[in-house]
């Protein structure tokens, strides 16, 4: 009886198991195809190309910068959405999460309209400083932050909503100030979700293409990230495109696995 119960508890019924298997295959087969077609013999030569190293470095730096900006702005924003009762907060939440479903190219056009030389804010920036933001490295970071930060916000907002407020109130009763309560009590409680949101934000920023090429362009050494290099190489050198895709795949997997392990440990999951 015990053996049957265990099998029934751990096994999956075929109406669920078959679609699950098909779903896993659908997601994994393209990756297997990429690994199977990779030009392994020419890989060292392709990856030591200075342009590839430059694009990879720019991708890693810009994705990390976008994640740090996203955390600095997104964590307070998530707290306000979760804890503060304001008129129109639901509309604000909908607009903030819009980049999740907005076509990235449209996001790039919106950034141009806001921060371009004649944009809503960009015109004043250009008049005051003579600096034009589009088609610069800063524009890469801004585009990646725009499309990636909502992933962090919705993840952390859910954690703030689920966190035990009694601990906050207890700390406040003992005389702790609001910012002290936030730093010492609230933030550690949602720490694993912050890490998870940061990982999602970083991964999305690393793979960003549409908003980047629209708002920042594709200039080697300045705005050409790895996804843009893959797109260009696909037209002229498919082997190079596969090699670059493989690099992005390996970097993403390594970071996600490392951060997921850290997240699970922080959450007490074995």
Image (tube, rainbow, N blue to C red):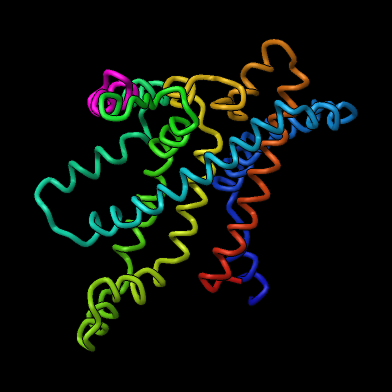
Taking the view exactly as shown, the residue that stands out farthest to the bottom is 174
Residue 189, quarter of the rendered image: bottom left
The reply, left or right, for residue 243 in relation to residue 225 is right
Taking the view exactly as shown, the residue that stands out farthest to the right is 41
Residue at (67% x, 11% y) in the render: 235
Q: Report the quarter where the N terminus lies.
A: bottom right
Q: Is residue 180 above or below residue 259?
A: below
**Residue 93, x across and y down, in percent:** 24, 45
**Residue 67, x across and y down, in percent:** 47, 47
Assess whether residue 123 is covered by the magenta stretch: yes
Residue 96, quarter of the rendered image: top left
The reply, left or right, for residue 157 in relation to residue 42 is left
Residue at (29% x, 76% y) in the render: 181
Residue at (63% x, 70% y) in the render: 6
Taking the view exactly as shown, the residue that stands out farthest to the left is 87
Q: Report the quarter where the C terminus lies.
A: bottom right
Q: Is residue 20 above or below residue 173?
A: above
Looking at the rendering, the stretch of residues picked out in magenta corresponds to 112-124
**Residue 137, x across and y down, in percent:** 50, 31
The reply, left or right, for residue 270 in relation to residue 46 is left
Taking the view exactly as shown, the residue that stands out farthest to the front is 129
**Residue 267, x across and y down, in percent:** 51, 70
Instruction: Count every numbered label the image shows and give the total.
Output: 0
Assess whether residue 173 is covered by the magenta stretch: no
Q: Nearer the viewer, residue 63 or 263?
A: 63
Residue at (33% x, 25% y) in the render: 130
């Amino acid at each position: 009886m015990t053996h049957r119960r265990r099998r029934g508890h751990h096994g999956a019924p075929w109406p669920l198991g078959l679609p699950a298997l098909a779903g896993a295959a659908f997601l994994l087969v393209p990756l297997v195809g990429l690994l199977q077609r990779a030009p392994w013999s020419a890989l060292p030569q392709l990856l030591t190309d200075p342009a590839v190293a430059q694009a990879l470095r720019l991708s890693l730096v810009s994705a990390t910068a976008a994640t740090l900006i996203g955390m600095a702005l997104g964590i307070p924003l998530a707290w306000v959405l979760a804890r503060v009762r304001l008129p129109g907060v639901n509309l604000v939440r909908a607009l903030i999460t819009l980049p999740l479903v907005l076509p990235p190219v449209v996001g790039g056009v919106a950034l141009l309209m806001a921060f371009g030389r004649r944009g809503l804010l960009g015109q004043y920036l250009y008049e005051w400083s003579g600096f034009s933001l589009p088609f610069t490295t800063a524009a890469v970071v801004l585009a990646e932050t725009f499309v990636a930060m909502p992933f962090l916000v919705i993840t952390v907002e859910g954690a703030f909503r689920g966190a035990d407020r009694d601990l906050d109130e207890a700390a406040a009763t003992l005389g702790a100030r609001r910012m002290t309560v936030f730093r010492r009590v609230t933030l550690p409680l949602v720490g694993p979700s912050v890490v998870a949101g940061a990982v999602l934000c970083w991964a999305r920023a690393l793979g960003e293409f549409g908003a980047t090429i629209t708002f920042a362009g594709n200039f080697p050494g300045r705005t050409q990230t790895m996804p843009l290099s893959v797109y260009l190489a696909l037209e002229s050198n498919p082997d190079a495109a596969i090699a670059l895709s493989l690099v992005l795949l390996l970097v993403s997997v390594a970071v996600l696995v490392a951060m997921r392990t850290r997240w699970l440990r922080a959450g007490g999951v074995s």
